[in-house]
Image (cartoon, helix red, strand yellow):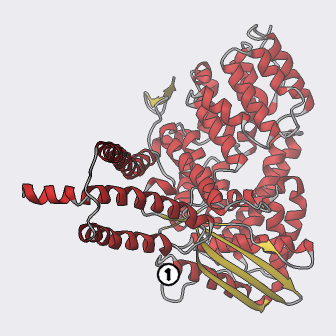
Amino acid sequence: MANFFAELKRRSIFRVGAAYTVVAWILLQLVTNLTPALRLPEWASSLVVVFLLVGFPVALIFAWVHQMPTESGAGTRASTGKLDWFLASALVVVIALVSYQQLAPVQSQQAEDAKPGGPSAQAGVISVAVLPFVNLSSDAEQEFFSDGMTEEVTSALARVPGLIVIGRTSAFEFKGQNRDLRMIGQALGTTHLIEGSVRKAGTRVRITAQLIVANSGAHLWTENYDRELTDVFAIQEDIARAIAGALRVPLGLQQGENLVSNRKIDPESYQQYLRAKALDQAGGGRRAAEVRALLEQVVARNPDYAPAWALLGFYYGGVALSAAQAGPLDESRRTVNTFLPKMESAVRRAIQLDPNLPDGYAKLSVLEDARGKLVAAEGLMLKALALDPDNPDVLNSYSLLLARVGRLKEAMPIRLKLQSVEPFVPVFNAATANLLWVNGQNDAALAMFKALPTLGAVRARGTARIYATTGRYGEAADALQGISEVIASPASAQEAVRLLRSGPASVTSADDLRSLERLGWVYLYVGAPEQSLQLQERLVDLGILYGEETREFWHPDYAPVRKTERFKTFVRKAGLVDYWRAKDWPEFCRPTNGDDFACE
């Protein structure tokens, strides 16, 4: 054996093997990095690996047969020794780099697994994001139609079990941006992307869709659909089924079921519905009356179209909520008593028409939540999540309900899952920041509020709250300067700023202090903590609740308020005590004698 190894050394087999390994590794790195950039097929790297593996024994045999010249002379031996040292060092570097490449993904995945929820939290999970379809129609105003097709395909894919679908709003963050698809996939945390285009001309529509591997940009599937507008639901169905097939994900449908189940609408009304959806997604609050009018026309012509009923019900509820927060009490009561029943009728009609429509249960849960029927609201939210586990709106509502009843530790993981499905929605991120603040994570909450790209009033209110919590009353007052009427009227905002600038001095009398609307928390810091309940007391008397301020009651700053009889009266009226008795008591409150309870 010793002679064999000596012969191998004499014929420079070790030297050839080391040199081959180093050169092969360098070539493999070049091919791996150039494959995505040159859009080479995925098998290109595999082919190079095969050639290199086959070439290794060939190189060794060639070195054995064609023996290298024997070392002679001191100069030759010295240069050969230097070559050996170089090859040995290079081989050690290659071994170290290969080890790192193998271990780093494992460590990265372990860190990712530690995060609750999210597509990347589980190895092998398939997630997709439907990027906004490009409008290729000659009429630029048809943008609503291409956006609508994007959203409808997203909704259809959301019905496929085991397939995580990134939310529509976050996917639309990249609309009109010519960015690298791998970067988009990384930003959204998704394994696959879907992109396409829509061209509508007269009564015909042409839709192109393609499925792309996010980390490489490779195309898995592409198809063109050129049909009549009357076939638009069939196109959506075909696209969703084809994508599921390309991903090898079972549809999980019963006999006769479709991914796109709501088809009882004429093409013209359907386009009107898509217009309403586009306005809603663009921030329907400012054009709520226009959205309601469009949807009322749709359901008048198509009384069996469930999605329009569900969305219309939501907008009826919006009218009631807006009226309840401000204005003369009698007028607000009339509006609430008019529109809440209309909301209930509309959403129950949606559920009756389509028992498998998650939006129907989601919108009805909002109504039950607002009425203080929290056990019923939670049941409806769980029903909606059973139909669509990654529905962003329901994840948002459910986590906020849990926070509202004091189950803060259960609410946070759901919000983290929501962040993974919809990472770029300012409204969701603001609510997450608010919940971080309630949990005492001031720095994280402040950073999240400051990062909001929109919602200036919400950002100002959130940062002001955190400044006040830490005793920075002047900065809190500065943050509220010029706050919009979305949060409070100019008079209420001006009074809140004045009080903050006087903090921590106490008001001379807590009697007859005016309502500061959604800035009522300012009273916590000027010696009138019970007055912070004013808005919520008004809402509960009107029979409609707004959950944001309610969940804030579990922040440590509200501890003095929670010990008062006034607070106990409020939580009884708001349905929290009924919920606690049916479910469980939060860490802040406990039952005492008889029907009484105490909060700390």
Query: Residue 464, percent across and down?
Result: 75, 26
Residue 160 x/y as whole percent = 53, 73
Which x, y percent locates residue 152? 69, 73
Residue, disc 1: 253
Residue 49 falls in which quadrant of the image?
bottom left
Seen at 84% across and 53% down, the residue is 285
Q: Percent from the top left, x then y, of residue 59?
A: 32, 68
Kind of residue sitting beneath label 1: Leu
**Left or right: 583, with 227 as reference point:** left
The one nearer the camera, 329 or 268, is 268
Q: Secondary structure at mark 1?
A: loop
Q: Nearer the viewer, residue 56 or 459?
A: 56
- The quadrant of the image that shows the N terminus is bottom left
Specify whether residue 351 is in view.
Answer: no
Query: In the current view of this chain or complex, which residue is farthest to the left?
Result: 1
Q: 232 above or below 533? A: below
